[in-house]
Image (cartoon, helix red, strand yellow):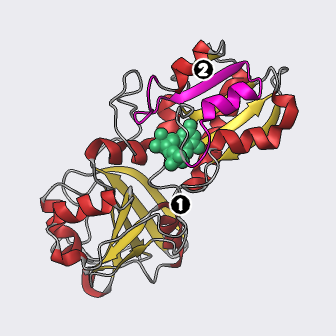
């Protein structure tokens, strides 16, 4: 059973992992905290982008030799393959880590998986620790893998006369762009949500998105490394994706208004689409931001078993 210090470290690792949202795809956003043999935090790290060190490597680097006999607390199972970075389970063994505490198993893990290899090397391993909380950050990556398409978030604001439109002019909406890989607008412009965030050549986007049928477009985006796509525009842009059941989340920015007004959107265009339930309602400068979902991504449905898939 995880100790209270390990649980505290796991929550911190989950928080750290979110620094990778919007830049790690097609890799997962992972966080790691190293505790020394007396359970004191001595190093922390996260995965920033594909081709760079994994969370465990970054945390071990920060911890240095004091990691010997310590514990690695990590949000995703340490990897079991030598890719662009060395296998994390080997890095942990080489650093003399005695115990590894993991939130979620990696459905893309190669071979027998990092957990089995760590156990074979005599390391004590505990899995499924705060798995549901870890899904707050890893959920979109896991869902995109399960669906073989990016998770889709439709974002819109109110333009004049109750019409919906793009959020480009909403300054606080920038935070959403930071967490997505790519953004598509109603004119067919498709680009990295934060330019250059994934590094050169990691995300490949089809040049003429509206030439592709919607499922084909999403398949091409998935193949190109996109795990979270924003649809930034009005109902005209979102309606066909909604009709095909392809929209997973909606974020609406409702401008401040007086306390009594006729319906801003008599046709209901501003209202959330049918079948979406609220996950957040926040007052932000000049807007109320409404978040809703058609699925619950925080439930770790497959932590106990693996479906072999490649990220
Ligand atoms: N445990 C763990 N920590 C990280 O920081 C990670 N990025 C991963 N990712 C796993 O490794 C695969 C990517 O490997 P490369 O970086 O491309 O070599 C990815 O599919 C995950 O399984 N895991």
Residue 27 position in % (x across, y down): 48, 50
Q: Nearer the N terminus, badge 2 or badge 1?
A: 1
Q: Does the rendering let one see residue 272? A: no
Out of 193 and 68, give the one closest to the viewer: 68
Where 104 sits versus 209, above or below?
above
Count of picture labels: 2
User: Pointers 2 and 1 in contact (CB under 8 A)?
Assistant: no
The residue carrying mark 2 has its beta carbon less than 8 Å from ligand 1: no
Q: CA distance from mark 2 to mark 1?
A: 28 Å
Mark identifier at residue 294? none
Residue 261: image quadrant is bottom left
Badge 1: residue crowd in 10 Å (few <14, some 14–19, many ≥20):
many
Badge 2: residue crowd in 10 Å (few <14, some 14–19, many ≥20):
many
The residue furthest bottom is 160
Secondary structure found at label 2? helix
Q: Does the rendering let one see residue 45? A: yes
Residue 251 position in % (x across, y down): 37, 63
Residue 188 position in % (x across, y down): 27, 81
Q: Quadrant of the N terminus?
A: top right
Label 1: which residue? 23
Secondary structure found at label 1? loop
Residue 145: image quadrant is top left
Residue 76 position in % (x across, y down): 54, 35
Mark closer to the observer (2, 1) = 2
Residue ID at (60%, 20%): 118
Q: Which residues are magenta?
A: 84-112
Mark identifier at residue 118? 2
């Amino acid at each position: 059973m995880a100790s209270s210090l390990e649980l505290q470290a796991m929550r911190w690792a989950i928080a750290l992992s979110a620094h990778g949202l919007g830049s790690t795809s097609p890799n997962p956003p992972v966080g790691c905290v190293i505790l020394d043999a007396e359970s004191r935090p001595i190093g922390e790290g996260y995965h920033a982008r594909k081709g760079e060190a994994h969370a465990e490597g970054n945390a071990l680097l920060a911890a240095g030799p004091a990691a010997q006999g310590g514990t690695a607390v990590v949000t995703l199972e340490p990897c079991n393959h030598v890719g662009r970075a060395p296998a994390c389970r080997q890095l942990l063994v080489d650093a003399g880590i005695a115990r590894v505490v993991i939130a979620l198993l990696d459905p893309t893990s190669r071979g027998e998986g990092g957990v089995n290899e760590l156990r074979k090397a005599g390391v004590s391993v505990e899995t499924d620790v705060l798995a549901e909380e870890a899904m707050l950050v890893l959920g979109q990556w896991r869902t995109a893998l399960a669906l073989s398409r990016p998770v889709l978030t439709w974002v819109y604001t109110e333009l004049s006369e109750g019409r919906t439109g793009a959020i480009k002019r909403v300054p606080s909406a920038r935070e959403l762009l930071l967490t997505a890989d790519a953004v598509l607008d109603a004119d067919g412009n498709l680009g990295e949500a934060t330019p250059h965030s994934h590094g050169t050549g990691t995300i490949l986007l089809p040049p003429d998105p509206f030439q592709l049928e919607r499922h084909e477009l999403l398949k091409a985006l998935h193949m190109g490394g996109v795990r979270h796509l924003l649809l930034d525009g009005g109902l005209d842009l979102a309606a066909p994706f909604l009709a095909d059941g392809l929209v997973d989340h909606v974020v609406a920015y409702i401008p401040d208004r007086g306390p009594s007004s006729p319906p801003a959107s008599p046709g209901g265009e501003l209202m959330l689409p049918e079948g979406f339930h609220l996950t957040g309602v926040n007052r932000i400068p000049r807007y109320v931001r409404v978040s809703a979902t058609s699925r619950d991504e925080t439930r770790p449905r497959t932590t106990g078993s693996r479906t072999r898939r490649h990220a």
